[in-house]
């Protein structure tokens, strides 16, 4: 998983709209059993299960909520730093129908899977009343089968980093970027065989107007000219030297260190690399930009981040929703941004002076998130991603042609979709 967690006091409203009862959201016949609007009160005990609180920002928000709501008490249960381990421990509890975790901090790509399994409560009523305060693209990550199963908590979107002493401005399109890279030190990105390569590929594909899964999530769309074109573009980038062959061993940190070494003119990476880069020897010699498109098309990124969902097995869903509402208010999102560099999902937070100070690139980050798209929303997303990164990797290694890889991606995605 990508390092989306590296990088916001108000009293909770006394009346909130209802969450729905638990139930499956998949095609297997589960029903949402949606409840009508009721009052969600900040009362009772709530346990929030999310990854390790490395900056103390999660604890700060919990403390703020508990102080503001004396009839309620939220406990933070920290899971491991690794997203894979977080998911494993959450899934163990959910399969056992454990009520230990009331609020689940979920990578955006887990939301559809959890919803399809009947592990989340439907929060469509809450989103219908409050969704307009969030950046729209982040709300899209909470949707599955026409319902909303979580509330956007933090987000993320990648940037192009470029050396200002090597190029005068950010290239206007991907073709120009790779042409400049070939003669000015190259571009580094996450080309290892893992989720990061899927994201890098999708950023290019979305900028080309392509897709790998249909809008209804029921069939693969990867055996297309857009997919073949992007695969060829990436493979040719290695062959021409625009991207060093070493990128096939790079994840986020390897890319960052290579860029900071002084040779590459460009890097694709997440916002966390900005502050670290400014402390490096090239700190005064780089800037960032949102993704370009291919010639004549708009750029598009891929969303990272976490959503907050309510376990279907929670004994206090009303109190859970009250906490989620509190944790996603602008002043609490500001804490997350300033203390932990977690990109907010609430639009208004980006205008806060403290956020602008902590994130000098706040305006560009908001734009990047607005133009970004979710990864395919599917309960079998892990298999979809594996189909992508394995075959893209083979193209980068020169072991598969773009046409063969596109067909393999399509066939493997369809096979995965048929399992659910």
Image (spheres, rainbow, N blue to C red):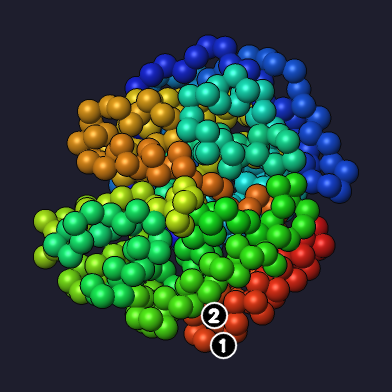
Q: Secondary structure at mark 2?
A: helix
Residue 8 falls left or right of residue 22: left
Residue 363 falls left or right of residue 120: left
Coordinates of residue 183 in the picture (x, y in percent):
26, 75
Coordinates of residue 130 in the picture (x, y in percent):
55, 22
Coordinates of residue 177 in the picture (x, y in percent):
34, 63
Question: Would you call the spot at circle 2 few (<14 residues within 10 Å), some (14-19), or many (20 or more)?
Answer: many
Residue at the front extreme of this rendering = 296
Residue at the top extreme of this rendering = 14
Query: How many numbered discs sit on the rendered protein?
Result: 2
Q: On the image, numbered disc 2 is attached to which residue? A: 395
Is 79 rendered above or below residue 410? above
> Residue 399 shows which numbered tag?
1
Do callouts 1 and 2 mark residues in contact (Cβ within 8 Å)? yes
Q: CA distance from mark 1 to mark 2?
A: 6 Å
Q: Residue at x 48, y 24 (%)?
A: 133
Q: Is residue 217 visible?
A: yes
Q: Residue at x 48, y 33 (%)?
A: 135
- Give whichever of 320, 96 is nearer the camera: 320
Res. 357 image quadrant: top left
Res. 220 image quadrant: bottom right
């Amino acid at each position: 998983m990508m390092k989306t967690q590296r990088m916001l006091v108000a009293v909770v409203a006394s009346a909130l709209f209802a969450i729905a009862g638990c139930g499956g959201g998949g095609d297997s016949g589960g029903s949402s059993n949606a409840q009508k609007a009721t009052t969600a009160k900040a009362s009772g005990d709530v346990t929030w299960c999310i990854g390790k609180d490395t900056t103390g920002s999660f604890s700060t928000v919990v403390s703020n909520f508990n102080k503001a709501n004396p009839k309620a008490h939220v406990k933070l249960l920290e899971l491991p730093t690794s997203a894979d381990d977080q998911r494993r421990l959450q899934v163990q509890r959910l399969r056992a129908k454990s009520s230990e975790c009331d609020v689940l901090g979920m990578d955006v790509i887990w939301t559809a899977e959890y919803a399809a399994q009947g592990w989340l409560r439907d929060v469509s009523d809450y989103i219908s009343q409050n969704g307009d305060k969030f950046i729209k693209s982040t709300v899209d990550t909470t949707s599955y089968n026409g319902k909303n199963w979580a509330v956007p908590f933090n987000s993320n979107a990648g940037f192009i980093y470029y050396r200002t002493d090597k190029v005068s401005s950010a290239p206007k399109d991907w073709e120009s970027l790779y042409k400049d890279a070939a003669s000015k030190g190259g571009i580094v990105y996450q080309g290892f065989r893992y989720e990061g390569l899927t994201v890098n590929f999708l950023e290019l594909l979305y900028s080309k107007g392509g897709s790998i899964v249909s809008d209804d999530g029921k069939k693969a769309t990867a055996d297309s000219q857009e997919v073949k074109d992007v695969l060829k573009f990436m493979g040719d980038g290695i062959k021409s030297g625009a991207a060093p062959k070493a990128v096939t061993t790079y994840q986020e940190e390897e890319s960052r260190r290579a860029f900071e070494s002084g040779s590459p003119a460009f890097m694709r990476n997440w916002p966390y690399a900005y502050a670290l880069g400014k402390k490096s020897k090239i700190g005064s010699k780089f800037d960032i930009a949102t993704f370009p498109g291919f010639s004549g098309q708009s750029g598009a990124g891929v969303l990272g981040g976490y959503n907050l969902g309510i376990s279907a097995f929670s004994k206090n869903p009303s109190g859970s929703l009250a906490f989620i509402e509190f944790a996603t208010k602008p002043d609490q999102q500001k804490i997350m941004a300033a203390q932990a560099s977690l990109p907010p999902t609430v639009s208004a937070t980006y205008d806060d002076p403290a956020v602008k100070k902590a994130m000098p690139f706040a305006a560009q980050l908001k734009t990047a998130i607005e133009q970004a798209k979710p990864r395919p929303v599917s309960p079998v997303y892990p298999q979809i991603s594996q189909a992508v990164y394995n075959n893209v990797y083979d193209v980068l290694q020169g072991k598969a042609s773009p046409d063969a890889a596109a067909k393999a991606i399509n066939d493997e995605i369809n096979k995965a979709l048929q399992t659910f």
